[in-house]
Image: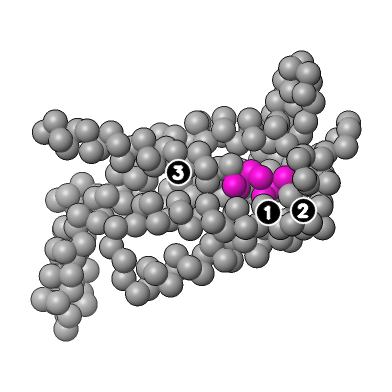
Amino acid sequence: MFNFIVEWMQAALTFFYNITVNLGVPNYGIAIILLTVVIKILLYPLTVKQVRSMKAMQELAPKMKALQEKYKDNKEKLNVEIAGLYKNAGVNPFAGCLPLVVQMPFLIAIFYAIRDYNYVSNPSFLWINNLAQTSPSDPYYIIPILAAGTTYFSSRQTTTEMTEQTKMMMMMMPLFIGYLTISFPAGLGIYWVMSNFVQIGQQWWLNRKAKVIGEAG
């Protein structure tokens, strides 16, 4: 099953590369960007579900704190009350993780797809010497910096309650992503950065729609 996803990714990459050839600008970097945009569009319904779930969880946060304070000495009762709170509000606390879980096979698959792809020409892109290689092909480390920056901005965009733990996670996760990007093929870094840019745009659109609906109501 996983090999099928890798083969599908490579076939899709070939398809988009052929589009760039037909347009007169043959480039694997552009093909990866096009592939990323299509994947994010396909996953958009899950993104909507994630945003709604996160918003609902944030709205329930005050009630959650009240229950935790009320039943701090009775964990069993606390769990029952929290489950009832979720049920009455129609909220699934795990729904916000679904898009990430669904995206992981694609992320892993595109790693192997880019690394093992049979390139018919040199896979360079702008300042990147070779999309299939790691950080030496990106001598200025622009992709890792963009990966860290867009990850932070995307996380900040969806976070309303800034606890100390949240602040720590928002600082550590982008740095961790940036570090990982250094050891990954540059093409995968482009996929991650472009995916974040599309995610930021989708989040902005959803926030704008919610604001318009709120003002109309």
Q: Earlier in the sequence, mark 2 or mark 3?
A: 2
Residue 189 included in the magenta stretch of the image: yes
Seen in the image, is 75 located left or right of residue 8? left
- The numbered disc on residue 142 is 1
Residue designated by label 3: 200
- The numbered disc on residue 204 is none
| Helix, strand or loop for disc 3 | helix
| Helix, strand or loop for disc 2 | loop
- The numbered disc on residue 138 is 2
- Classify mark 1: residues with Cα within 10 Å, few (<14), some (14-19) or many (20+): some
Seen in the image, is 164 located left or right of residue 64? right
What residue span does the magenta drawing correspond to?
Answer: 187-193
- Name the image quarter holding the C terminus: top left
Residue 7 % position (x, y): 73, 35
Residue 190 % position (x, y): 66, 45
Q: Residue at x 77, y 31 (%)?
A: 27
